[in-house]
Amino acid sequence: MTSSLPSRPFVAGSKITAPRLFVGRTEELDFITSLMIDMQPVSINVVGPRWIGKSSLLYHFFQTYEQRVAEPMRYAVIYLSLQDARCQSEDGFYQAVARQLWLNLTVQKSVALVEPLRVKPFNR
């Protein structure tokens, strides 16, 4: 039987963007989900050496969170690469976050969430 998946799915390289190529990390994805849906959501940091899959893990969560939670419209999940040149200053970071939130469908469907993003310039 021939498979379209690579023979070695764990190859260091750029972020995995195709969900079918993301393998494993179920425990980590469940942990992120549990923190997000808790009564008191908290921030998390994903840290580790280069090339161990931090970006792939977070991007996969971004792509699949709607299948992981009971009410996906309660959450506005964005993916933002901090390696982007626009994120190299504090103001650039806030602008990038606002831009990604603005593009989020959950945010677009809520006037209460959209209105604060109309502020120019968007900063702390």
Image (spheres, rainbow, N blue to C red):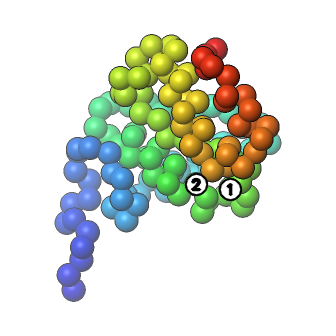
Q: Secondary structure at mark 2?
A: helix
Q: Amino acid at mark 2?
A: Tyr
Distance, label 1 to label 2, CA atoms, is: 7 Å
For label 2, count other residues whose C-alpha is less than 10 Å away and answer few (under 14), some (14-19) or many (20+): some
| Residue behind mark 2 | 65
In the drawing, does residue 5 fall left or right of residue 45?
left
**Where does the image place residue 30, in percent across and percent down from the top left?**
58, 53
| Residue at image location 32% in from the left, 40% down from the top | 52
* Residue 72, label in figure: 1
| Residue at image location 23% in from the left, 45% down from the top | 12
Q: Quadrant of the N terminus?
A: bottom left
**Where does the image place residue 88, in percent across and percent down from the top left?**
40, 17
In the drawing, does residue 73 fall left or right of residue 93?
right
Q: Is residue 115 above or below residue 103?
A: above
**Where does the image place residue 61, in percent across and percent down from the top left?**
51, 50
Depth check, front residue: 87 or 119: 119
| Residue at image location 74% in from the left, 32% down from the top | 115
- Disc 1 + disc 2, Cβ < 8 Å: yes
Residue 73, picture quadrant: bottom right
Q: Quadrant of the C terminus?
A: top right
For label 1, count other residues whose C-alpha is less than 10 Å away and answer few (under 14), some (14-19) or many (20+): some
